[in-house]
Image (spheres, rainbow, N blue to C red):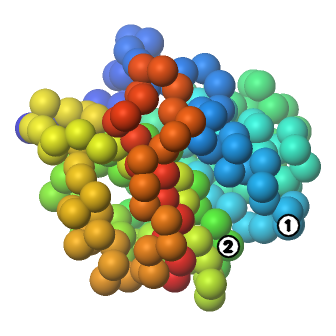
Amino acid sequence: MRNLNKEYWDDKYAQNTTGWDIGYVSTPLKEYIDQLKDKNSKILIPGAGNGHEVEYLFKKGFTNIYVIDIALQPLQNLKARIPSFPDNHLIHMDFFDLTISDFDLILEQTFFCALDPSLREAYAMKMHGLLGPNGKLSGLLFDFPLTEDGPPFGGSVAEYRSIFSQYFTIKVLEPAYNSIKPRKDNELFFIFEK
């Protein structure tokens, strides 16, 4: 298993080996975002990478968005694309060290699957702690056999139910019908409520 630390991710950006970055907001998240009504919602996007979801939200008028990534380069890339994005909402640190909380929504896109699988329970517990009352954790999880060859690391509906049902009410956990072609039949769309 690789050491998935800050240096690992910094090197991925330095070498431009960011195959997970499709260059735009993924269709399932775009369609979910399009249904959101409250532009003042406090939203967190962890492990955001180049933050195409962030850019889409911001252009739609959402202003209370926070972005966290362990690598600095993607945060700089996002700031270059959106110069008016608030600097204090671009957080360069390890997700598990984040102390800001009371989020209404946390959007998941390729972050969970990039963490060492031994951290999955800690991820679920941390997400629960970061959300405010009635907060939601929503997004996409990969649906293919768990492997040691990641990231990305896979997982299954049964595993996700086991991990997340301890902390959340599982409202939706189903195959994404609108995945982009390279991820078709490999993604689950979910909405978990605190």
Circle on res. 104: 2
Residue that badge 1 annotates: 38
Q: Quadrant of the N terminus?
A: top left
> What's the CA distance linking mark 2 and mark 1?
10 Å
Q: Residue at x 34, y 65 (%)?
A: 123
Can you say whether 110 is above or below 184 in the image?
Answer: below
Can you say whether 187 is above or below 61 in the image?
Answer: above
* Mark 1, other Cα within 10 Å: few <14 / some 14–19 / many ≥20: few
Q: Nearer the viewer, residue 92 or 114?
A: 114
Q: Nearer the viewer, residue 165 or 118?
A: 165
**Which residue type does callout 2 highlight?**
Asp
Spot occupied by residue 145 in the image (x, y as percentages of width and height)? 16, 41
Given the current orientation, which residue lies at the most extreme top position?
Answer: 15
Q: Is residue 28 visible?
A: yes
Given the current orientation, which residue lies at the most extreme front position?
Answer: 177
Q: Residue at x 48, y 21 (%)?
A: 181
In terms of secondary structure, where does tag 1 sit?
loop
Circle on res. 65: none
Q: Is residue 51 visible?
A: no
Residue 95 found in image quarter:
bottom left
Can you say whether 150 is above or below 136 in the image?
Answer: above
**Which residue type does callout 1 highlight?**
Asp
Given the current orientation, which residue lies at the most extreme bottom position?
Answer: 133
Q: Residue at x 20, y 33 (%)?
A: 150
Spot occupied by residue 5 in the image (x, y as percentages of width and height)? 28, 41
Left or right relative to 81: residue 149 = left
Spot occupied by residue 57 in the image (x, y as percentages of width and height)? 78, 45
Spot occupied by residue 77 in the image (x, y as percentages of width and height)? 65, 25
Residue 64 found in image quarter:
bottom right
Q: Which of pointers 2 and 1 lies earlier in the amino acid sequence?
A: 1
